[in-house]
Image: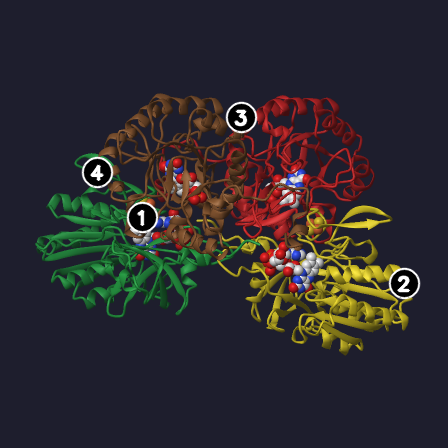
Chain colours: A yellow, B green, C brown, D red
Amino acid sequence: MTQAKTDHYTNSALKIGQVDNYPDRVAGEFISKVVSNDSVNGEYKLIVVEVHEAALRAYAGQMFHLLCPSPDSSEVWMRRPMSIYRINRDARQLEFLYKVEGRGTRGIATLNAGDEFNIAGPLGHGFTLDPQWKNIVVLGRGVGLATLAPLSQLAADNGVGVTAILSARSPDVVMSRDLFEACGAKVVTVVDTDNSSEVGNVEKILAGLIAEKKADAFFTCGSERLLKLMQRLGREHNVPGQVAMEQIMVCGIGACYVCMRTFEVNGEKVLKRVCRDGPVFNMQEAVAW
Amino acid sequence: MTQAKTDHYTNSALKIGQVDNYPDRVAGEFISKVVSNDSVNGEYKLIVVEVHEAALRAYAGQMFHLLCPSPDSSEVWMRRPMSIYRINRDARQLEFLYKVEGRGTRGIATLNAGDEFNIAGPLGHGFTLDPQWKNIVVLGRGVGLATLAPLSQLAADNGVGVTAILSARSPDVVMSRDLFEACGAKVVTVVDTDNSSEVGNVEKILAGLIAEKKADAFFTCGSERLLKLMQRLGREHNVPGQVAMEQIMVCGIGACYVCMRTFEVNGEKVLKRVCRDGPVFNMQEAVAW
Amino acid sequence: MVDLSVRIGDLTLQNPVTPASGSFSWEYNDVIDLNRLGALVAKTICREFRWGNPTPRMAETEAGIIQSIGLPGKGIEYFMEHIVPEYARFKPPLVVSCSADNIEDFAALAEELSKSDDVAVVEANISCPTRNLTGQNFAMHEGYTRDCIQAMREKTKKPLWVKLSPNAGDMVSVAMAAEEAGADCLVIANTFLSLKIRTDNFRPALGNKFGGLVSPALKPIVLRMVYQVAKAVKIPIIGIGGVTCAEDVVEYMLAGASAVGIGYAAFRNPTALVTIIEDLEKWCDARGIKKVSELIGAVKDDDMELDTLVAASKGV
Amino acid sequence: MVDLSVRIGDLTLQNPVTPASGSFSWEYNDVIDLNRLGALVAKTICREFRWGNPTPRMAETEAGIIQSIGLPGKGIEYFMEHIVPEYARFKPPLVVSCSADNIEDFAALAEELSKSDDVAVVEANISCPTRNLTGQNFAMHEGYTRDCIQAMREKTKKPLWVKLSPNAGDMVSVAMAAEEAGADCLVIANTFLSLKIRTDNFRPALGNKFGGLVSPALKPIVLRMVYQVAKAVKIPIIGIGGVTCAEDVVEYMLAGASAVGIGYAAFRNPTALVTIIEDLEKWCDARGIKKVSELIGAVKDDDMELDTLVAASKGV
Ligand SMILES: Cc1cc2nc3c(=O)[nH]c(=O)nc-3n(C[C@H](O)[C@H](O)[C@H](O)COP(=O)(O)OP(=O)(O)OC[C@H]3O[C@@H](n4cnc5c(N)ncnc54)[C@H](O)[C@@H]3O)c2cc1C
Ligand SMILES: Cc1cc2nc3c(=O)[nH]c(=O)nc-3n(C[C@H](O)[C@H](O)[C@H](O)COP(=O)(O)OP(=O)(O)OC[C@H]3O[C@@H](n4cnc5c(N)ncnc54)[C@H](O)[C@@H]3O)c2cc1C
Ligand SMILES: Cc1cc2nc3c(=O)[nH]c(=O)nc-3n(C[C@H](O)[C@H](O)[C@H](O)COP(=O)(O)O)c2cc1C
Ligand SMILES: Cc1cc2nc3c(=O)[nH]c(=O)nc-3n(C[C@H](O)[C@H](O)[C@H](O)COP(=O)(O)O)c2cc1C
Ligand code: FES
Ligand code: FES
């Protein structure tokens, strides 16, 4: 007796090919079309979607808010935020690399080529490159690599050298290696299986890069432990940095104040919205958990 | 963050091949398997399911309560009652003929061969044949034909002659004709398109059958108008009868008192539960709307 | 293997899973083994014969149903003679819910029900939102509740359970009044007074206009009530509202309930009660919980300054 | 083409679809054209700076979310100087919601907000369940409500809207008290006080323990409240709770609301408000409804003896 309501939701969401007649648009609700949705390894999948061109304004470090289909019989009530993994403007495609965790990501995992997928974005404040930086160091672990990946493209476009330190449990789950290498980055992988991912060893690698003048800026995401390490080295050696943070979200647009995290700005604690003030923040201001 | 809960519901529901160790079972919750789910005409579909043998105790006029999959993004919250259209004990199959109407039946329409389908039953009190009856008259319209159809089988098994008057909007949506004919029934179809379905004409046909002594009992379902006609003729000519009634249901088992309809027993108005006291009732006691 | 038994005052239930009044009858024995349940709970009975409310008595909503049955029944005499024996065939204790328009009738019902050895518990349904057209009932007010329960207490030595209303603004005060007046257990809660209007014909969807909303979506509201009341009273609580799986039973017990009641889930899946009992056993066994009663009120809420996500990330 | 405008006292809204306070900000202009909305509604502002509540501030539930934000903000001064101008760029009238712990602060907020020509309406959020750890607020009691609204009324000539709490047991009395005290419009309702306990670590899921439940499932409860209050007061009502489509707007208007507020639906679909406005127009046009305001209170409830399913089958 209740009516299906899903159709209504999307009337004002932009489909591929539709005319966008809203001049103030910064972000949008888009009905994208799934191109592929394949497993990268046992835990991660990569979903490629075709979208309306207004969604391609996205840049590295920004995110989209995804309306996940249900993996069972009841709705997934809230959207899930995902970093943009890759922007392919020529093919009008966006890519998201995601870890299959709970109901939301299990729902995304059910999508097949040709399915519609409602995504909202691009949202938030992403990575920025200072024109003075010649060489940057990117340090990521786990799902954080998905967020850092588009930095490789951004750096290449700006003629900036990249050393990417990719941390993972074991060699077979190191992700984004190809992407970084294709953009000319020097890739170092460190893994738990041979203890090379231990903080002490990563610190040695970073110190070496600083000494070699290969570290004009630090970028990280995905590990509180590695964030703390980079913060300390950055302070000691005066290396500026940026970090992408996570928090549970509701609106994704800056209105609801659900996604707050603590930052320390000029010695004072402040709360900032991860969705709009971030997800990328000044590394020294971030307060790790 | 919420957990999928659907799996839990069905742990105690019987799957095909499972041992049924409950001695008091009258009805059950069954995980059936869809064999086919094809369109009969523009409005109706026939779903055939394979079930645990405990579900095959069903008989004509009883119903099952169907847990409908969602046709959209939100659950169908209540089960939907459906008459048994055909019981095929040899193949361990049950068949339901249904009209695609609202969310529930649209959900059923999405099922494909091989899918699981949770059905509860057999429920209620069905048709009964008095051993003294030699010839009965079955009069149905629309979805009511789905309910009356298994009477053809029951009558054939008991050596009872059947005249089936099938009423429909137009000749192409007359259903169950084959089923009745296969069981040796004489079939008369009346349709709106040539006005043969008008009450006056149906009355003439019924009066003829009474005169020919072909009407030891009346059976009907699916039209309040035709019910009133049979009630009147039954009273005038002393023909006993049975009618299958409909009402919105919740439990289907007799506990909730949602599915009440008014009956007149010995001149007194009483309420009865369609799900347990019916769905088949003494025709003279029914109060048509 | 976990010990699933729980005590409600002097009464021991073999497990904390019971049906909710009005959504259950002995006829469920057609489908499940009633001897496995924590208790049997009869539909609310009144002194007099009642037709109940006009149909339709149920309408689907966004995420559940509203219903207005109106307590139909043949009255207490018929009930004692014909219905109680139906339940007496089974082992779990029989809880009989009753309702009336006034305190005298409530007291008379308590007295009448106490005459049968087959009735284990008298449950006072002072919270039915479908009894009359307005949805008002005694459980909206602490004063009425106290007077009503006191009058019933005087007439019965059986355990007296009191079913409260989620429509009361201050359930804690109502609960305390019921406790003071001699209630042995609080049943939290009945249904939420609601309305659905059809946009095709502009009419209320139910024959009696208002109905009680039943939906798994409401569980967080009722859980909050159970939690608040559990902090304020000493008598046990039975949590009712949106239980559909074993984890929901655990959540209610953590909040302070000693048992739960189930309605909706058994409509959706007639075998739900048994499934939930089995799953609860597995849940406890997997965690090495020896007695399910350890879970009662075991919520960890004493350091609520702490950011619980931080806590979670630290593995607390 | 239907005339979608509605009047709320002296104020005319171009259509009855407005955002709900706290789930909206001018930043939504990134995604939708704010000039199409019935009104702009700012997040509840307090006099002082507030951190808001510890995280997590949101958790998913069976059918929706619970949230406890705790009214974070930089205080009224910052708001007047920096936030009001952000809204002033758009055409729809600006409703500013405000909250305080005591009547003096409420009155001071009313006075302060009235100084700006860019503020069209002062909304008294006397019903926020996340302001403190207990979930208590003025809108639970008719006396507190009367005193608070009277004090605000003395300090402002702007339209004064009052947001009520669904946790009140007797919302009709609270609503009448607000009307008597000089409210120009009632906003029904805020969120339902709720609790979720995690079964993995036995801890409340939210940093502030209790939260407000938000879910389309709750619409029938709030609709009942709107209906009851509409029969008891003369001032207009804005219905808020579970609106996700144009039919929901119609249902609230039939029950007696003059407009609706929307929160959850815009989280799920950032373009929902515009979609709903467009669908409402189509819905009215398809039925030949000339003015959407004809729908206000148009529920057909004067023959409730009749079996409405019978009525439906007779084509009534
Ligand atoms: C800015 C941002 C970018 C992100 N980018 C990616 C990405 O590129 N790839 C990827 O796989 N994941 C990413 N995440 C994390 C992703 O949002 C969560 O994994 C996802 O929401 C989990 O949803 P679920 O339904 O599968 O699991 P749930 O069952 O909802 O949750 C599983 C676990 O994830 C936690 N969680 C839920 N929502 C969030 C959230 N919004 N932020 C952080 N933790 C959460 C829960 O507390 C729980 O511990 C990102 C998160 C943020 C905030
Ligand atoms: C004993 C019994 C046997 C039935 N047998 C069959 C059958 O064999 N084939 C068939 O196609 N249909 C049968 N029906 C009717 C069937 O149950 C309804 O068509 C179905 O519930 C509609 O569900 P829906 O979600 O598709 O539509 P909804 O959107 O739920 O409803 C569409 C219309 O059907 C009405 N309706 C909903 N539920 C019921 C109900 N339980 N009884 C009567 N009307 C209802 C609604 O008021 C509405 O007008 C039977 C009903 C009963 C009570
Ligand atoms: C159809 C129906 C009939 C009910 N009848 C009664 C009743 O007679 N007495 C009573 O105390 N509660 C009655 N209730 C309320 C239930 O006992 C229970 O409180 C409510 O359904 C919430 O639990 P649930 O979420 O598990 O369904 C009824 C509920 C439904 C759905
Ligand atoms: C994240 C969030 C924040 C909210 N903040 C406020 C607030 O600051 N002031 C207020 O009056 N209501 C607040 N509310 C309540 C909403 O205004 C609204 O009453 C509620 O969400 C119900 O409407 P919905 O069902 O359309 O979401 C908030 C709701 C949510 C979900
Ligand atoms: S998610 Fe709403 S402000 Fe960030
Ligand atoms: S549907 Fe529950 S008694 Fe018939």
How far apart in space, not on screen, are marks 3 and 1 (Cα)? 48 Å
On residue C34, the disc is: 1
Badge 2 amino acid: His
Callout 4 environment at 10 Å: few (<14), some (14 to 19), or many (20+)? few
Labels 1 and 4 share a subunit: no
At mark 4, the secondary structure is: strand
Quadrant of the snapshot with the C terminus of chain D: top left
* Residue bearing the label numbered 3: D232
For label 3, being within 8 Å of ligand 4 is answered: no
Badge 3 amino acid: Ala
* Picture quadrant where residue A16 is located: bottom right
* Residue bearing the label numbered 2: A237
Could you tell me how many numbered marks the image carries?
4
Residue in the foreground of this view, choosing between D91 and D284: D91
Of circles 4 and 2, the one toward us is 2
Task: Give the residue at x 83% y 65%.
Answer: A218
Residue B196 percent location from the top left of the image: 24, 56
Q: Can I make out residue C291 in this image?
A: yes
Q: Are marks 3 and 2 in contact (CB under 8 Å)?
A: no
Q: Are marks 4 and 2 in contact (CB under 8 Å)?
A: no
How far apart in space, not on screen, are marks 4 and 2 (Cα)? 93 Å
Badge 1 amino acid: Leu
- Identify whether B64 is placed above or below D235: below
Q: Are marks 3 and 1 in contact (CB under 8 Å)?
A: no
